[in-house]
Amino acid sequence: MTMLDWTSMAGLLAGRVAIVTGASGGVGRGLARALALSGARVVVAARSPAGGQETVALIEAEGGRALFVATDVCDATAVRRTVEATVQAFGGLDIVVHNAASTLARPTPLEDIDDALWAEQAGVSLDALHHLAHAALPHLRDTGRGRLLVLSSAQGQHGGAMNPAYTALKAAQRGFVKALAREWGPYDIVVNALAPAALTDAAKAYLEADPERTREAMKSFPLGRMGDMRDDIGPAAVAMCSDLWRYVTGQTVNVDGGYYTAL
Amino acid sequence: MTTSASTHGALDGALALVVELGLPLLSGVGEGLQDAGAEVVASRDPRWAGSREDVDAALLAALGPDRSPALVVLSLLGEETTAFRPLGDLDLQAWRAGAADPIRVAMRVLAALGARMKPAGRGTILFLAPSLSLVGGAGMVALSTALEGQRGLMKSIARQWGATGVTVNWAAAAPRALSPHFDAADLAAKGDAVPIALGRRPDARTEIAALAAWLASPAGRGVTGATLMVDGGEWMVP
């Protein structure tokens, strides 16, 4: 697959300021790069300084502006400080992308989900949304073009069999988006979810280990491949955060090469 | 509304467990299941919201040590879940109690029920909830988050348990048909000239209970992981 020609999207987010959580690698890094390529100044909010700084370096190498702020999204104080640092550095906040996900979101049978596992996963998925919404609302309301984008998953729609906690929490995020879109609509804040099928390093390793498995898996994708994090998932996120999608709110958009078509 | 002839006797002798936490939504359904001939055990034991050991104790108190229900109807909401408050008014404790805890409670309840129902090789679990979680509502972020989380969990468990003969489904009913509590809510409304296709809300005793009875009958055993709208054709989602 060729790289996307970003000139068509250059300037789409000019003058906007965005926070992307979990942007020290994976999908979050791809989204942060995409937002920056479209003109947004981006705060890379993540726990890992090394990965976060690497994302900043990539953005700067692509001509963008970014700042790493060490952030544990489960910590309300840390999230508030990140929002304050963003406003101080870039003069405001227009876009919040909550992409961070628990590293413990591995297949776990229902009976084996203990309180610690639940607390970790619910913290990153739901507590973090609470913290981000509280800290960001005054700024998103002031800007008149506020955007909150939550990275969900098709598993929350079709029901992943192997990971009930992850499935439930990704479905819960869709409920959050639908209700908050109605609550924040009067402020012209658009709230949506994006369910990606991204070719992360983990997905790539899983598929490359077994070519036959890859052939079988790709039958589920009409486009025949999983998405590049910057060049396939990123442009959809940019559009959803731009004025082009200002009348779309409360929705979950599947950016997955046609993987989930059951809605 | 009168009890329909087709519902009468549909559950003759079957054991139905009705578990309710938070807002009382299921009394009419329990009566309807009795009309259908079921032996109904209704439980509002607060231990259903506790640890796994507490849940096992609540199940033991409700059904004794050995019995496995043919039908379970669940409404697992916390008090904070159904309070109509903007997200900005919820501190972290209230947010967790309203949004996350009901999902965790549902996990424990399902695990306890599964330990009995899967070995029995049969049974139907039905979550019953207001349909507003499917459309969202201002002041109801915690409710919508909790219910959609439970609905996602329902799908996951339906897939996990399908081969055991246990089915799991979700019924979304018109909120005001379940409780006058929702009269005070700022509910999303269809703006069509005919907002509810049937022109009325469903009756819990005769119509919602009938759906549960049908799911528990041989005719309904092929349905699992489904979201069934019992709102008279109001939303017609998706």
Image: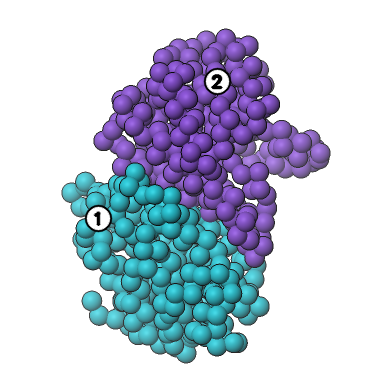
Chain colours: A purple, B cyan
Q: Residues within 10 Å of mark 1 (few under 14, many from 20)?
A: some
Residue A67: assigned label: 2
Q: Regarding mark 2 in the picture, which secondary structure is present there?
A: strand
| Residue B29 sits above or below residue A229 on the image | below
Q: Is residue A43 above or below residue A175?
A: above
Residue ID at (29%, 81%):
B3
Splitting the image into 4 quarters, where does residue A52 fall? top right
Judge depth for marks 2 and 1 and give the one in front: 2
Image position, residue A54 (x, y; %)? 66, 21
Corner quadrant of residue A131: top left
Please state, as top left, top right, bottom left or bottom right, where the N terminus of chain B lies in the image: bottom left
Image spot of residue A201 (x, y percent): 71, 33
Q: Please, is residue A65 above or below residue B7 in the view?
A: above
Instruction: List the single residue furthest toward the bottom.
Output: B13
Q: Identify the residue shown where x is 58% and y is 62%.
A: B157
Q: Which residue is mark 1?
A: B185
- Alpha-carbon span between mark 2 and mark 1: 42 Å
Instruction: Please give the chain letter of the residue carrying mark 1.
Output: B
Graded by Cα atoms within 10 Å as few (under 14), some (14 to 19) or many (20 or more), the crowding at tag 2 reads many
Residues A60 and A262: in front is: A60
Asked if residue A186 shows in the view, the reply is: yes
Farthest left residue in view: B193
- Look at the numbered disc 1 and give the secondary structure of its residue: loop
The subunit carrying tag 2 is: A
Q: Amino acid at mark 2?
A: Leu
Residue lying at 49% horizontally and 30% vertically, measured from the top left: A82
The x and y percentages for residue B32 are: 34, 80
* Both labels 2 and 1 in a single chain: no
Taking depth in this image into account, of A257 and A122 the one nearest to the observer is: A122
Instruction: Identify residue type, mark 1.
Output: Ala
